[in-house]
Image: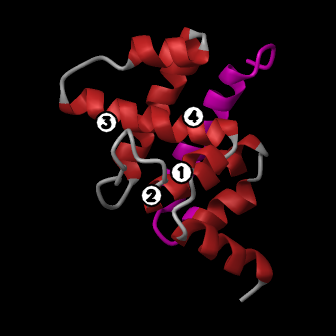
């Protein structure tokens, strides 16, 4: 096992603190928790997502990320309660996926997700994450 893979396995199994994630990764995890709560209670998450990121395009694109994950994930995506300071296993994977997409590192993204997602699902989620990240960065839409 390479150092890179053993480090990643440790990171994904330690359930990191949300505050220790990158800002983009932490925001994505917390927003996903919020979206799931809204779905369970028949509320629209868009006003809060728009407030969180300051623009409707980022909110819309994040909703597409959530839909892509919901459509592609092999099991129900597990999220921790909103107040939980640690990321669950799926959330830690999402954080790593966001980080890979933010760095435009498709090889890392595929390495993270290849065992559980087919190539079409990986492509859909990666493109959705890239589009969301571009919408978050002023002047790069």
**Viewer-nearest of discs 4 and 1:** 4
Residues at marks 1 and 2, CA–CA distance in whole angstroms:
6 Å
Which quadrant does the C terminus fall into?
Answer: top right
Which residue in the protein does label 2 denote? 90
Q: Main secondary structure of the magenta part?
A: helix
Q: Which residues are magenta?
A: 113-141
Label of residue 27 in the image: 4
Q: Is residue 125 left or right of residue 103?
A: left
Residues at marks 4 and 3, CA–CA distance in whole angstroms:
14 Å
Whether residue 72 can be seen here:
yes
Residue 27, by quadrant, is top right
Q: Residue furthest left?
A: 41
Residues at marks 4 and 1, CA–CA distance in whole angstroms:
11 Å
Rendered location of residue 60, percent (x, y): 49, 19
Callout 3: helix, strand or loop?
helix
Residues at marks 3 and 2, CA–CA distance in whole angstroms:
13 Å
Residues at marks 2 and 4, CA–CA distance in whole angstroms:
15 Å
- Is 64 above or below relative to 75? above
């Amino acid at each position: 096992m390479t150092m890179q893979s053993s480090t990643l396995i440790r990171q994904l199994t330690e359930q990191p603190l949300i505050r220790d994630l990158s800002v983009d990764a932490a925001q994505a995890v917390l927003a996903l928790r919020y979206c799931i709560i809204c779905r369970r209670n028949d509320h629209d998450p868009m006003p809060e997502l728009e407030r969180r990121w300051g623009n409707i395009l980022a909110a819309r694109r994040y909703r597409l990320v959530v839909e892509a994950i919901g459509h592609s994930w092999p099991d129900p995506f597990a999220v921790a309660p909103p107040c939980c300071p640690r990321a669950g296993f799926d959330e830690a994977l999402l954080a790593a996926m966001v980080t890979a997409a933010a760095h435009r590192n498709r090889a890392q993204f595929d390495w993270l997700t290849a065992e559980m997602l087919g190539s079409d699902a990986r492509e859909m989620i990666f493109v959705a994450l890239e589009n969301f990240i571009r919408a978050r960065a002023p002047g790069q839409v």
